[in-house]
Image (tube, grey):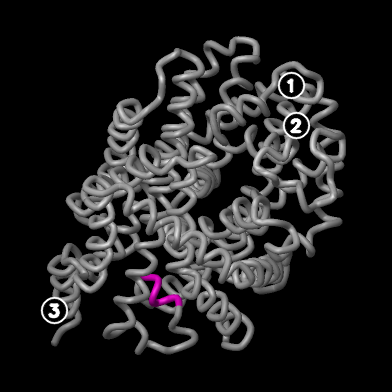
Amino acid sequence: MSLVTEKENVIGITVETKKKTRKGVFWPAFLVVGGGAVLGIVNNKMLAEISMNGFLGSLRGLGWLYQIISIVALVLVGILTFSKLGNVRLGGEDAKPKYPFPAWFAMALTGGIATGVITYGVNEPIIYFASIYGELKQTGVNPGTPLAAIYAMARSFYNWTFIPYAMYSLSGLVAAYVYFNRKKSLSVTATLTPLFGDKVTKGIWAGIVDTLAVLAIALGLASSLGAGLALVGSGIEATYGIKQGPVVWLVLTFVITAMFTFSALKGLDKGISRLSDINAKIFYIILIALIIIGPTLYILRTSTAGMAYWLQNFWIWGLDPIDIGGEALVMWWTLYDWAIWIAYAPLMGIFLAVISHGRTIREFMIVNWILPSVFGMIWFGIWGGTALYWQQHNVVDLATTIKNSGAVAGLWAFLANLPLGTIIIPVVMVTLMLSFAAGADSMVRTISSLCTVNIRHDEEPANWKKLLWALSIGTIAFVMVAFAGGVQGVDGVKYLAALGGSTVLFVFVLQVASAIKMFFMDRVE
């Protein structure tokens, strides 16, 4: 057979199979997620109950494992970034990057944070400061004191910077290296080949591993969208007097789902990269505006003290058991955060891998670990610092707003107090929707790719798959916000996040083990 014929056969196989569905991944995952959407419509109480029991059981029983693996991931990415391994290029020495640095960073940043920093940049520090749900009960810190403000900043830094981004980065690096350098398939299962060899990519195990990853990210996306619905809904109520409820949430679900679905259908270059660029620029403008408007000196002083307190307590917080720190703090905040980051990690890792061809490991870690972590510190320092200053100086009572209206409601009272608040509030609402869309479009694309046979990183999966996953995720998010809000207003959303993390936790543990073997025991190419 001639070389030309071989090439033609390869091309023929690619054309023939690239749109075929991986039935062993698509159907089990879709039946669970789609079935959850249907169950939510038919019997929302049952869905909420199942999710709640899964949330409580997984975090109480597996909290210790979340804590250990998060610290191990952090140590590993630190070594990989600053050792000579950082010089290894993804795709080989001659590989060239496709995206310029600003576009690459915008996709990595907005794809990873979705609505999180906007949702909790104001709310989380105030919740800690006032111990609204009992977060400070077992810490020895008195609510409402200057120390409580420093503690609030420190704990926010801990939950939103270097540890969670280490999880994303490690999953992404393993996926990128096995795909570009070891020429394995673009799948979660392939990231386990350093441990188990190629046999893990064949037969039932390939389907099980990738199905778990799809389930995790689908539930994680639903939880993020649910938080976004609750937040925008509370903003509409606080600002325009339109009471939030199922009708408002349903309209928002349609709008936001339509945004990220359209972007995903447009593809990586025409949709996702452009939306990410717009979203990132809005983030930068908001930060600059707030540092000018806000109490700049207080922000700098509290952020500095918060960093010191965070570093001083780093290890005890990292391994703090629930019975010492208390469920209100450790389980409902830190472990919940770890669960949702791990839920995202395997498939977020594939997305980060796809856009990182031609970059060195050090460049990969700078863009996906260090810079997003620094961005998180700046964001919480500015937003959280301003909120804490206003709360302490009786400018606006954000704590009471949160107590009365739910865990995500403080943002709107905060924004209303800014100069030009009537203009800024709708801008932030649009930014929230763009933020979720910028994260969800990349993940819907990645889910659809994982459900497709032999797809390459530069090929688009079938549009019907993207549409189907987007609608299922939107439906579940709506149901959990509308019918399982709970005390915090977003309890149902948190249940979903923990379920997502627990479905893929052991896969992530194996990915960490793969990284150790591949980079420290095998020959690095």
Cβ–Cβ under 8 Å for marks 1 and 3: no
Report the mark closest to the observer, 1 or 3: 1
Determine crowd level at label 2: few under 14, some 14-19, many 20+ residues with C-alpha closer than 10 A: many
What residue is disc 3 on?
5
Residue drawn at x 50%, y 48% as measured from the top left: 104
Residue 186 position in % (x across, y down): 36, 69
Secondary structure beneath disc 3?
A: helix
Label at residue 385 = 2
Q: Quadrant of residue 30?
A: bottom left
Task: Confirm whether residue 357 shows in the render.
Answer: no
Secondary structure beneath disc 2?
A: helix
Residue 279 position in % (x across, y down): 48, 34
- Amino acid type at circle 1 is Gly
The magenta stretch spans which residues? 186-191
Report the mark closest to the observer, 1 or 2: 2
Q: Real-space Cα distance between discs 1 and 3?
A: 67 Å
Residue 453 position in % (x across, y down): 23, 70
Task: Confirm whether residue 319 shows in the render.
Answer: yes
Q: Earlier in the sequence, mark 1 or mark 2?
A: 1
Cβ–Cβ under 8 Å for marks 1 and 2: yes
Q: Earlier in the sequence, mark 3 or mark 2?
A: 3
Residue drawn at x 48%, y 84% as measured from the top left: 194
- Amino acid type at circle 3 is Thr
- Amino acid type at circle 2 is Gly
What residue is disc 1 on?
294
